[in-house]
Image (tube, rainbow, N blue to C red):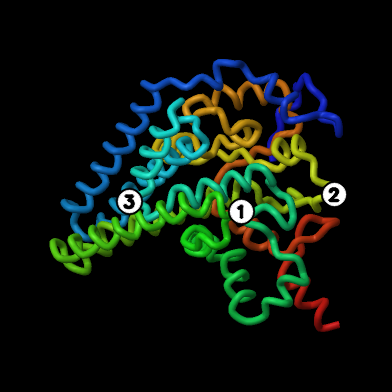
Amino acid sequence: MVAIQNSSHTLTPETTLRDIIKTIPAECFEKKPLRAWLSVLFSVAAAALGYASIAFSPWYLLPFAWILTGTALTGFFVIGHDCGHRSFSNKIWVNDLVGHLAFLPLIFPFHGWRFKHDHHHLHTNKMGEDNAWYPFTVAEYEEGKGLISNVYRMIRTRFWWIGSILHWANLHFDASIYPERQQKQVKFSYRLVIAFAVIVFPVLIYTTGLMGFVSYFVMPWLVYHFWMSTFTIVHHTMPDIQFKEKDQWHAATEQLTGTVHCDYPVWVEWLCHDINVHVPHHVSTGIPAYNLRLAHKSLDENWGQYMYKTKFSWELMKDIGDRCHIYDAEKCYKTFAEVDASNKV
């Protein structure tokens, strides 16, 4: 963890998110249509380059082509992400249209994701509410013996990179888990992506064969989910970041100190539109992606001593996978080994 020490504000129990937002320059909240549409063009061009590289690469270069394409498609998600937060355009219909189009190649239902993601922002790191990398309690882990516990162990250790696939499948195709007022939009979104898949997948298989389907869709899609799983687990999961019970949860504290800024290779940050600059996004979802770095600079100057900063590495992922398993109210997390050992006593 690296913290900026020369901050000029103090975080107290009386501090509100509004207090923090007031320290961010107004220009950070400005929507710039040209910047927004240039981001779209950049991602479309990057994805087109990726698909062209798949088409023309020899077999031994295909992994690089898949990585490029899948990472470019993650940029599509970030554009849709801004649309979901209404920070892409001032017009709701534009946000919904672009959001759905950006999510289609990912087979990701826009409205279902949007509603669940809004809930994550309202209840970040709150036990019993947050739906993003929520840690099991000991009781939940023990009650889920069998398939559920085994899958949980997988995604909390070396198979974290499939976590977003399970999140996608479990939360976004079942309208019954949403409030009635949201169900019509949820159904529209998942029916749209299903219709897209029903049309596009057979055409892709017919024209390129089964291996073409794997090469053009499955492999880039898995790369996309690798980044989605990695970004989202790192955003709020560290051995010393505590999920809080509802009666102890404090919005300003959890959004500012419970969110991680992580530096990735520059090419990843470019293709993914700075999704890793995440602290300002949790202070206010109204900041467009292209303004996140300016907002982060301001937060560093004003609240830096409370901010968690790190750098992506395989050692970082190993540390998270080795230590961040089961919720513990005193030391943030217990490991599976500690829980299993206590059950044998």
The quadrant of the rendering that contains the N terminus is top right
Question: Which of pointers 3 and 2 lies earlier in the amino acid sequence?
Answer: 3
Q: Measure the C-alpha gap from mark 1 to mark 3.
A: 22 Å
The quadrant of the rendering that contains the C terminus is bottom right
Mark 1: which amino acid?
Answer: Ala
Which label lies toward us, 1 or 2?
Answer: 2
Q: Where on the picture, by quarter, is residue 45?
A: top left
Q: Please tell me how crowded label 3 is: few (under 14), some (14-19), or many (20+) other residues with Cα within 10 Å.
A: some
Q: What element carries label 2?
A: helix
| Residue 265 image offset from top left, x and y in percent | 46, 40
| Residue 118 image offset from top left, x and y in percent | 59, 44
Q: What element carries label 3?
A: helix
Q: In this view, does 150 lie above or below 101?
A: below
Mark 2: which amino acid?
Answer: Asp
On screen, residue 106 versus residue 338, left or right, reads left
Question: Which of pointers 1 and 3 lies earlier in the amino acid sequence?
Answer: 3
Q: Is residue 55 above or below residue 18?
A: below
Instruction: Identify residue for label 3.
Output: 105
Instruction: Identify residue for label 2.
Output: 247
Instruction: Identify residue for label 1.
Output: 132
